[in-house]
Amino acid sequence: MSTAAVRAVLCVDDETHILSSLRRALRAPDLQVHTANSGAEALALLAKTPVDLVISDMRMPEMDGAALLEQVQLAHPDVVRVLLTGQADHRDTIAAINRGSLYRYLQKPWDDAELKQVVRQGLERRELEQERRRLLALTQTQNEQLRENNALLEQRVAERTADLGRAHEELKRTYMTSIQVFSS
C-alpha cells in the first residue's frame, strides 16, 4: 500500500466497546478510522465522507451488517467490505458474503494482527483495482488514438499511391512521346 496516502476505514457496530477496540487495533499514521453505531449512521457518513474500507458487525438492530454492506456495495462499489461476526450461523454469513460481495469476514473475537492484515490487504486490493481501471482507461484511450493515427496514415498512403500512379502515367506518356519523336 502507498505509504504516503491516508486511507479511511469505517467501523460499524452497535456496541461502543467493540468500536473502541477496532479503533485501537487499527491505529496507524496512514489510517483514518471512522465509527458508526448503526447502519443508518454508517450510510449517512458514507454519503458525505470518502471511505476506502468498511468493517461491519453482522448483528445490529434495525439494519444488520449484511443489509448495510449490500447497500454499500450498490452505492459505493469501490469500497472494500468486511463482515465482522460473532455468530456461528454460517448460512447467514455465506448469504451476507454473496449479497454484499464481501472481501472477507472475520470472527469475533478477532486477532488484532489478522484484522490489520485483512485491512491492509483489502486496501492494497482496492489500490490495485483502481490502478487496473486507470491502466485500462489509458489503454483504451491509446488504442483509440492509434486507430485514428492508423486511419490518417492509411489515407495518406492512399493519397501518395494515387500521386505515384499519376506520376507513373505521366512518365509513360512522356516516354511514349519520346519514342515517337525519336522514331520520326
Image (tube, rainbow, N blue to C red):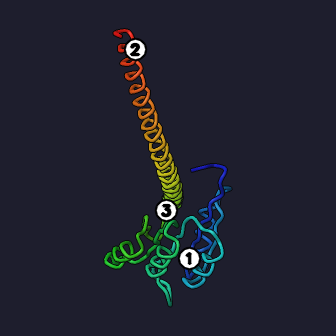
Give 49 or 181, whichever is nearer the viewer.
181
Helix, strand or loop under label 2: helix
Q: Secondary structure at mark 1?
A: strand
130 in relation to 63, above or below = above
| SS at mark 3 in the image | loop
Q: Please name the amino acid that badge 3 sits on.
A: Asp
**Which residue lies under the disc numbered 1?**
12
Give the CA separation, mark 1 to mark 3.
18 Å
Q: Earlier in the sequence, mark 1 or mark 3?
A: 1
Quadrant in the picture for residue 16:
bottom right
Near-viewer residue (74 or 25): 74
Measured from the top left, where is residue 164 in percent x and y?
43, 28
From this viewpoint, which residue is outermost toward the front? 184
Which of the two discs, 2 and 1, sits closer to the camera? 2
Which residue is tagged 2? 178
User: On the image, numbered disc 3 is attached to which residue?
Assistant: 111
Identify which residue is drawn at 43% across, 64% down.
Answer: 103
Point out the image quarter for the C terminus: top left
Looking at the image, do the residues carrying marks 1 and 3 touch, with CB atoms under 8 Å apart? no
At x 65% / y 76%, what residue is drawn? 48
Residue furthest bottom as drawn: 62
